Amino acid sequence: MKERIILSPATLDDVEFIVDKKTSTSLWFFEDFISSDKEAVRKNIVEKIKSDWYKQYIIKLDNPERTPIGELHIHWYVKERGSWEMGYCIFPEYREQGYCVEASKIALRYAFEDWNAHKVVAMCNEFNIASYKVLERLGMVREGIFREELPWQGKWVDQFFYGLLESDYRKMNI
């Protein structure tokens, strides 16, 4: 099946676009703290784009316009253990259409087939049902619950921890 999206590696030309998205509180509902300091966010993004440990992508429709529909990042989690951490955000008008699963499958393919990952992990707020459904559709396993790990909306909430081993990935047909 032809993929409907592409992961476009972020370049320095994309920094302002990413800064706008990373500082948008409406996109990150399940995060308690979103920096409004665009200069600090900009500096952080530039450092990450130039690094070899952090991969920042813009999720785009595979159409002539290459319409941006979200962002995905994957970075070393514990380098010595061969583990990577993945996170993502799909813009509201493109949610619930399978795009996040498709983008994440591409990122998993990169991690396991190109970067020799042993494991990919992801975490999410316990109330972010859409996010943990994406992770479960990818075949990731809920390995743990960090109790009251996240401050969110004036209270402490649990964070779910998911993982996918390279050996599990090889058994799947992603």
Image (cartoon, grey):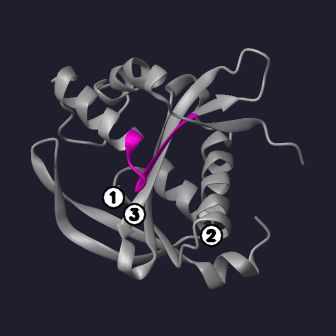
Q: Which residue is mark 2?
A: 112
Locate residue 22, reporting x and y percent: 33, 30
Q: Is residue 101 above or below residue 93?
A: below
Kind of residue indicated by mark 3: Trp
- Of the image marks 3 and 2, the number of the one nearer the N terminus: 3
Q: In whole angstroms, how far apart are the C-alphas of marks 3 and 1?
A: 23 Å
Kind of residue indicated by mark 1: Glu
- Residue 36 seen in this snapshot: no
Q: Residue furthest bottom?
A: 167
Residue under the point 11% across and 50% down: 155
Q: Which residue is mark 3?
A: 76
Q: Is residue 154 above or below residue 38?
A: below
Kind of residue indicated by mark 2: Phe
Residue under the point 46% across and 77% down: 82
Q: Which residue is mark 1?
A: 126
- Please report the bounds of the magenta region as a residue range: 50-58
8 on left or right of 123:
right
- Of the image marks 3 and 1, the number of the one nearer the N terminus: 3
